[in-house]
Amino acid sequence: MLAFSLPLMALAETPTPLSLPSGPVILTVTGNIANTNVGGEAQFDRAMLNALPQHEFETSTPWTEGVNHYRGPLMRDVLARVDTQSGTVHVAALNGYEAEIPATDFASYDVILAMAKDGEAIPIREYGPLWVLYPFDQDEALLSEKIRFRAVWQVMHIDVY
């Protein structure tokens, strides 16, 4: 009987290369990433983010009234798309706000990069176009001040390290 083995690297799945954005860039990811499309960056337009598997949940937030329905890719899927295994992300918003978020949050909770609220694109004046959003109503641990500071709205840039 003839036996052989493949190196483990041959079994690892190589991510599909990122296409170039065809519309306005709404998210740039930099840092410790292997899958890029413009220089050393991963630039995404709305269509590219919509092409990722979408996740949705209903939740209230400390900044909005009532319970709303949110949809967008899971943050762990966004990070997988840029091919990173890093432990922390630095998120920067259009309004100058910045936060560091441990990647363990994205493994522990279904944190999304919300792109839609109640079926509509989220406008800039209402925390869009992208919002790192935790499912606040699904776990009491998410109601802490520490987590609230990580729920960055008006996201424009993510740096992975």
Image (cartoon, rainbow, N blue to C red):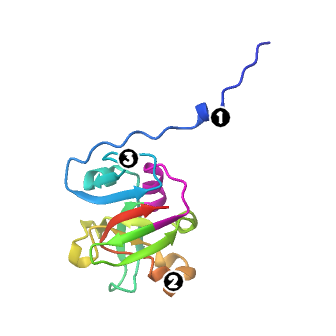
In the rendered view, would you say 52 is above or below 150?
A: above
Label 2 amino acid?
Answer: Lys
- Asked which secondary structure carries label 2, the reply is helix
- Image quadrant containing the N terminus: top right
Of the numbered discs in the image, which one, if any, rests on residue 146? 2
Q: Nearer the viewer, residue 1 or 69?
A: 1
Mark 1 surroundings within 10 Å by alpha-carbon count, few (fewer than 14), some (14 through 19), many (20 or more): few
Q: Residue at x 47, y 65 (%)?
A: 89
Q: Whole-Å distance between the Cαs marked 2 and 3?
A: 31 Å
Dot 3 corresponds to which residue?
36
Dot 1 corresponds to which residue?
8
| Residue at the limit of the structure toward the front, as seen here | 39
- Residue 12 x, y percent position in the rendering: 58, 37
Q: Residue at x 49, y 87 (%)?
A: 145
Residue 85 falls in image quadrant: bottom right
Q: Whole-Å distance between the Cαs marked 3 and 1?
A: 24 Å
Q: Residue at x 53, y 38 (%)?
A: 13
**Pointer 3 and pointer 1: residues touching (CB < 8 Å)?**
no
- Residue 44 x, y percent position in the rendering: 30, 53
- Give whichever of discs 2 and 3 has the lower sequence position: 3
Q: Which residues are magenta?
A: 74-89
In the rendered view, would you say 19 is above or below 84?
A: above
Mark 2 surroundings within 10 Å by alpha-carbon count, few (fewer than 14), some (14 through 19), many (20 or more): few
Residue 64 falls in image quadrant: bottom left
Mark 3 surroundings within 10 Å by alpha-carbon count, few (fewer than 14), some (14 through 19), many (20 or more): many
In the picture, measured across the screen, residue 143 lies left or right of residue 122, that is right
Of the numbered discs in the image, which one, if any, rests on residue 156? none
Label 3 amino acid?
Answer: Thr
- Residue 86 x, y percent position in the rendering: 54, 58
Residue 87 falls within the magenta-colored stretch: yes
